[in-house]
Image: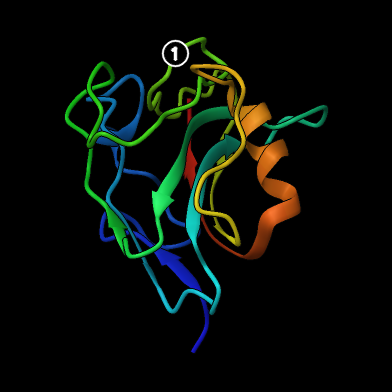
Amino acid sequence: MAFLLSSPDFKDGDKIPPRHLKTGDNLSPQLEWTDPPGGTLSYVLLMEDVTTADKAHRHWAIFNIPADRRHLAPGRSSGARTEDLPHAVNDFGEPRYDGPHPSDSEHSYRFRLAALDIAELPILEDVPDAATVWDRARDHIIAEAGIMGTAKA
């Protein structure tokens, strides 16, 4: 079996439903994963717009997700967390999910789930930014699973 990330809300490569867009209900999608590799002690999740040429724009990051987890429930609103898991500050300056909001053509959004060999990331800030979380996770990644979705302006 393979380490896989999926969502009952959209299939890999499909359009992300309006309720998950920033202009919609701004709800984080439900995410589920299977078959994490042996030695997994925690997970980090990152959602980013990968359409821009210069750098990915980070919309959501959660870290120190316990190793026994196999899903993240859908969100309630842009101001509410789905659970009491640590959120990093996204590129909108908020420690929460902010859904797709492309300003021009169709954009692609990647959800990345990294299985880590460490139970908690060594974070110095109380609320770190998403880039810092992913950077700290890099040296501890055992495997990565992902799903892509698209959204149009």
Q: Nearer the viewer, residue 32 or 121?
A: 121
Provide residue 84's location: percent of width, then percent of height.
25, 34
| Corner quadrant of residue 95 | top left
Query: Which residue is found at the position 52% from the left and 83% from the top?
Result: 2
Residue 93 or residue 43, whichever sits in front: 43
Q: Residue furthest right?
A: 54
Q: Position of residue 32 (x, y in %)?
A: 33, 62
| Residue 25 coordinates in the image, percent (x, y) | 22, 25
Q: Disc 1 designates what residue? A: 94
Which residue appears at 21% of the width and 23% of the height?
A: 77
Mark 1 Cα-neighbour bin, 10 Å: few <14, some 14–19, many ≥20: some
Judge whether 36 appears above or below 31 on screen. below
Which residue extends farthest bottom? 1
Q: Is residue 136 above or below residue 11?
A: above
Q: Hey, what amino acid is under mark 1?
A: Glu
> Does residue 140 lie above or below 4 as drawn?
above
Q: Does residue 107 appear in this view?
A: no
In which quarter of the view is residue 132 placed? top right
